[in-house]
Image: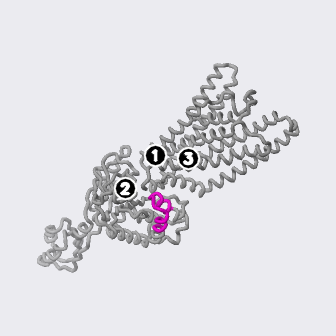
Amino acid sequence: MSAMIPSSSPAIETRALRKVFGDKVAVGDLTLSVERGEVFGFLGPNGAGKTTSVKMLLNLVFPTSGEAYLLGGSLNDPLVRSRVGFLPEHFRFHDWLKGTEFLALHAELYKMSGQQARRRIADLLDLVSLTPHAGKKLREYSKGMLQRIGLAQALLNQPDLVILDEPTSGLDPVGRRLVRDVIRELRRDGTTVFLNSHLLSEVEITCDRVAFIKHGQVIRVSPLQSLVEGELSVEVRARNLRPEVVQGLSRWSRSVRLDGEHIALTLEGEADLPQVNRYLVEQGVDVFALRPERISLEDLFIQIVGTDGGL
Amino acid sequence: MSTLTIARLSFREASRRKILLAALLLGLLFLAVYGLGFHFIMREVEKEIGSMRVLELNQIRNFLLMAGMYVVNFLTAMMIVLTSVDTLSGEISSGTIHTLVAKPIRRWEIVLGKWLGFAIMVSLYLLLMGGGVMGLIYLRSGYSAPHPLSALALIWLNALVLLSVSLMGGAYLSTLANGVLVFGLYGVAFIGGWIEQIGSFFPNPSASQIAINLGIITSLMMPSEALWKRAAHELQSPLVTALGVSPFTTNAYPSGVMILYAILFMLLAFALAVRRFGNRDL
């Protein structure tokens, strides 16, 4: 079946996607391209339109204007959806079904044959560590178990594209690691993963590229490595600091903050570190410590999106 | 066939939530009470007027059959509305619909699948209840109504009309608003039907005409009472019809055009359900 969809086209492509509910603009102008095989993080504050965007990609919500394609095909096309897996945000399922029955139902909707489905379900239950609970009704599952069975549901058809909406929000640390491992495995198999998450540490660990969105608009798309590797925050502890020396640091850094004998500054890259050190020593400053720290994605998020939460 | 998957899902849900079991047990209880009642009433009547006066006995049997079928019609209508009123709106508000719609399935297949699942359920229920009432009477006294199958078919059509309206309401409204809509329409049709019935006995022809028109208008808004009246007409013995003395029917029964209207009404409601569910945000 996947042979009918050209595999060279991007996994996700949207052009000026817009959604308005009444007089509220949920998504303003979403233009995005996610390549095949990448793990793509979709970041933004609450209310930025992330879930509405995801729902538009899955044809759950119809855009007011703009275009979107999954795997090069129309969102309307069941053939396209047969190559996509989806874990919705609130993972509400038919809770009167048993674990196995739930997966069997969705396998049936993916039009998998009985035998094929049985084998795949057994594998997936194993993958998400739910084999001992397969005979229990979903009603008796904990939040984390529901999320894991939901993840298994999203992988039934061995999809080319998996869309995960907050896949770790209900999970304990063990569950989170499990999801991370699953995502890694998917990447290894060449599956595209679209990850909508506000848990930045998750994104930091798993994603190749991230998009920051605010007010329903993509404000920056960047490879995660260059984002985090590029900027560096440095903490200096020193005495004999004269104000003009501190001012001189602005040659390397846009933000320099002095607090007693501590200076906090951000550098463009590691290469600047020895120069800063040499400069301070030459100016007669006694340097006790010079600690470079990678900027966390969280800091970056706040830098890019701002602290107003986008609301 | 995704439609059949969804139909089976509705069926399984009713079964898991003990709806089928409750309906079966209470249905059997109803039939037991009805059968006993029928037996004791006929025993007293036969003592009173003798078991040889078949014509009169048959009138009483027919009256009791109509009473039983009246309740069956009502219970069938309640059953179909109560089971289906929540099925679209409930899945939309809880979010369980999201994983379904994201699958390679068309939205109309979900609506059709649900319709089919509930239609099969209510068909079985009606066979049990209607078949039970008429079967018990036949077993006890050898009496059968004039056109039992046409009557069952009309009660069945009534249930399918209500099912389609309740799915339509579920695609547009919340569960509670949908319940208010369907039962509200049912109530309007019910009272309109009785006004028409009582009005047909008015000596003043113009007052009578107003009452009849009122009945027709309410039947156009919701043809459920008209379908029952036609079903009752199919069940009623010709003698009672000639005498015109029954709380269940009048001489003026709905025509074939009304049946056709009810079918079109059902199709329109279903089409609106498909259209609305197909283009709404979930």
Dominant secondary structure of the residues highlighted in magenta in the image: helix
Q: Which residue is mark 1?
A: B277
Judged from the image, the secondary structure of the residue bearing numbered disc 2 is helix
Q: Give the CA distance from mark 1 to mark 2.
A: 21 Å
Residue B83 at x, y percent in the picture: 58, 49
Q: Is residue B125 visible?
A: yes
Q: Is residue A160 left or right of residue B152?
A: left
- In the rendered structure, are the residues bearing label 3 and label 1 in contact, judged by CB atoms less than 8 Å apart? no
Q: Is residue A119 located in the magenta-colored stretch of the structure?
A: yes
Mark 2 chain: A
Which numbered tag is attached to residue B85? 3
Q: Give the numbered dot on residue B17.
A: none
Of all chains, the one bearing label 1 is B
Chain ID, mark 3: B
Residue A185, image quadrant: bottom left
User: Reading the chain from its start, which is encountered first: label 3 or label 1?
Assistant: 3
Q: Is residue B166 above or below residue A120?
A: above
Q: Residues within 10 Å of mark 2 (few under 14, many from 20)?
A: many
Q: Residue at x 28, y 56 (%)?
A: A32
Name the residue type under label 3.
Answer: Val
* Residue B227 located left or right of residue B276: right
Badge 1 crowding class, 10 Å Cα cut-off, few under 14, some 14 to 19, many 20 or more, is: many
Task: Name the secondary structure under disc 3.
Answer: loop
Horizontal and vertical percent position of residue B197: 67, 29
Q: Amino acid at mark 1?
A: Phe
At 32% across and 60% down in the image, what residue appears?
Answer: A43
| Numbered range of the magenta stretch | A102-121
Dot in front, 3 or 1: 1
Residue indicated by mark 2? A80
Q: Could one spot residue A258 in this view of the protein?
A: no
> What's the distance in space between the residues labelled 3 and 1, CA to CA?
14 Å
* Residue count near mark 3 (Cα–Cα under 10 Å), binned few <14, some 14–19, many ≥20: many
